[in-house]
Amino acid sequence: MRRLVSLFSAAVFGAAAVTGVPGAHADVTPWFARSVGNATQVISVVGVGGSDAKMDVYQRGAAGWQPVAAGIPAHVGSAGMAAKAKSGYPATPMGVFTLPYAFGTAPNPGGGLQYVQVGPDHWWDGDDHSPTFNTMQVCKRAQCPFNTGESENLQIPQYKHAVVMGVNTARTPGDGAGFFFHTTDGGPTAGCVAIDDAKLVQIIGWLRPGAVMAIAQ
């Protein structure tokens, strides 16, 4: 595992990589340590002002928490961060969220998560009145049984690669839909978390089921 972490850091993050992996005696206690349950892979996102954030990557093993990489520039919602997601409000919700599966317009880059390659008929249902609210759906625009004007077609450049964030898993109307960890276009998001595509691909390759994202200001 230690060799994997070192190679991952060097290959993905360059100057942002952690240069030394702590040994068994190291005392590394990340801010999220008491909030992530039994998760062994955590992506930490901490706001640094406005729509900018810093991303750190951690792995938990027999020696405890070990930083994989630190200081990755990230973008969050144009309204910054909020305590809770809200439909139509472009803020990134704070909390701990599952990362259940990945998708993208590009072919599967590999990794431990299920991956869906999306095309013009893939949508994320954002219609608060739809029974499939806050889920991925496949349909022709004219035949979709939900309001496509309130939903998002997934064939866009920002979704070259993406990971679904488990926000509003209860699918409560009004509590937001369509939150992803995706490729950045260089600007704020509508509430998602976005980073450089090359780094994102490497992280997707590293992720395994049970990983979470922890977000705070």
Image (cartoon, helix red, strand yellow):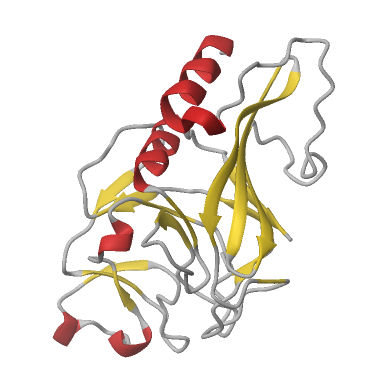
**129, above or below 73, in the image:** below
**65, above or below 193, in the image:** above
Where residue 80 appears, as percent x and y from the top left, is: 63, 72
| Number of numbered callouts drawn | 0
The residue at 48%/74% (across/down) is 190
Q: Quadrant of the C terminus?
A: bottom right
The residue at 54%/49% (across/down) is 73
Q: Is residue 123 left or right of residue 78?
A: left
Where residue 88 appears, as percent x and y from the top left, is: 51, 86
The residue at 84%/22% (across/down) is 27
**Nearest to the observer: residue 133 or residue 25:** 25
The residue at 35%/47% (across/down) is 197
**Nearest to the observer: residue 84 or residue 101:** 84
**74, above or below 19, in the image:** below
Q: Is residue 121 left or right of residue 2?
A: left
Q: Quadrant of the N terminus?
A: top right
**106, above or below 154, in the image:** above
Image-quadrant location for residue 154: bottom left
In the image, farthest residue toward the front? 15
Where residue 113 appears, as percent x and y from the top left, is: 40, 39
Where residue 205 appears, as percent x and y from the top left, is: 39, 32
Image-quadrant location for residue 150: bottom left
